[in-house]
Image (cartoon, grey):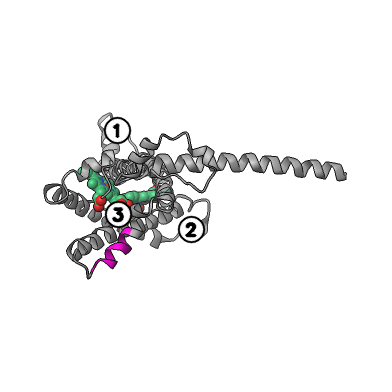
Amino acid sequence: MFLAIKLLLKVEVILNRIFCKVLKQFYNRFLTYFTGKTNLNFNMALIEPVKPEFADTLQKKRYSPGLRLWHWLSAIIISGSLLTVLANSTITAGHRNASIIQKSFAEKNLTVSQDQAREAAHEISDNVWALHTYFGYILITLFIFRLILEFSHRADQKLLRKLKFAYTQLNGVHSKQAKHDIVVKSLYLTFYTLLGIMAITGLCMAFEDDVPALKIHALREIHSFCMYLILAFIIVHLAGVFLAERKNNKGIVSDMINGGKAD
Ligand code: HEM
Ligand code: HEM
């Protein structure tokens, strides 16, 4: 018995070592590829294969590969999500399609009750909501990815550090730039907060049939209201990027594609 426990403990130690090694390797790879940073505190043998000149190029990027990946994937998924909402309030709207279904059956001398037509129409809009919910799960995954990035980014790439830095520059010679940075970064922070609210309220709605306690009407209202705030952010953001590109930040969009150079 004692021998068996000793053997089990040995196996546990070996498994623990392997697990830690794999985790370290994964963490180092994650840092190198997505944040352009290598963790020198970890086993040096693991990071040596990275070419120094390659690592140097990554170090100088303005936007990390992870942030760029997050940005463009999120832009696509949020646009898809908004399209599903647009579809369900126009072409696949339940009330609209119910009358179309009834009319179409009547033309073929078939009668369908209003309830039957409504049920068929709701089936279509439910499918669109299901697609919306799938987009929602992808968005939540991307949101978690963005949170992890914030913790593992280089100090000068962290959104919160940039905001803090701008505050420290408010009374300096670059106070105008600092004010601009505070407005822009605060807007991004507000957007991330909104995304968090969308994720929580959306998840509650997705599981309200399984967990009756989550069936709260206010959550639906909050979810829909936040959509307008997100729409407002997108409009202001696109206008801001357009102006920056035309004025003092030329190449900002291509920087968001290829990384750009850090200041
Ligand atoms: C649904 C659409 C979009 C959303 C939700 C969105 C969201 C965001 C967010 C949250 C950031 C800040 C990233 C960070 O530093 O943490 C950002 C940055 C940026 N986005 Fe977008 N974006 C969208 C579409 C676009 C489009 C279409 C373009 C280009 C035409 C664009 C260009 C940029 C650029 C250049 C930056 C960097 C700006 C800076 O450094 O302050 N975005 N975007
Ligand atoms: C930018 C992101 C999002 C936007 C703009 C958005 C927008 C909306 C809107 C306007 C509605 C209709 C609410 C109502 O019935 O009054 C809705 C419903 C819903 N959303 Fe989102 N949403 C987003 C993200 C999410 C996320 C992350 C989830 C999480 C899974 C989610 C899950 C749901 C669910 C389950 C419904 C209810 C569908 C139904 O009635 O069957 N949404 N969304």
Task: Return the residue at label 1.
Answer: 105
For the residue pair 169 and 95, the one nearer the viewer reads as 169
Task: Return the residue at label 2.
Answer: 214
- Mark 3 / mark 2, whichever is N-terminal: 2
Q: Residue at x 42, y 52 (%)?
A: 147
Evaluate if marks 3 and 2 touch, with contact meaning CB atoms under 8 Å apart. no
Measured as percent of width and height from the top left, residue 173 is found at 18, 66
Residue kind at label 3, given as amino acid type? Met
Measured as percent of width and height from the top left, residue 213 is found at 51, 60
Q: Is disc 2's CB within 8 Å of ligand 2?
A: no
- Of all residues, the one furthest to the top in this rendering is 108
Q: Which residues are magenta?
A: 162-170
Q: Is disc 3's CB within 8 Å of ligand 2?
A: yes
Picture layout, residue 237 above or below residue 129:
below
Q: Is disc 1's CB within 8 Å of ligand 2?
A: no
Q: Residue at x 33, y 39 (%)?
A: 57
- The local secondary structure at tag 3 comes to helix
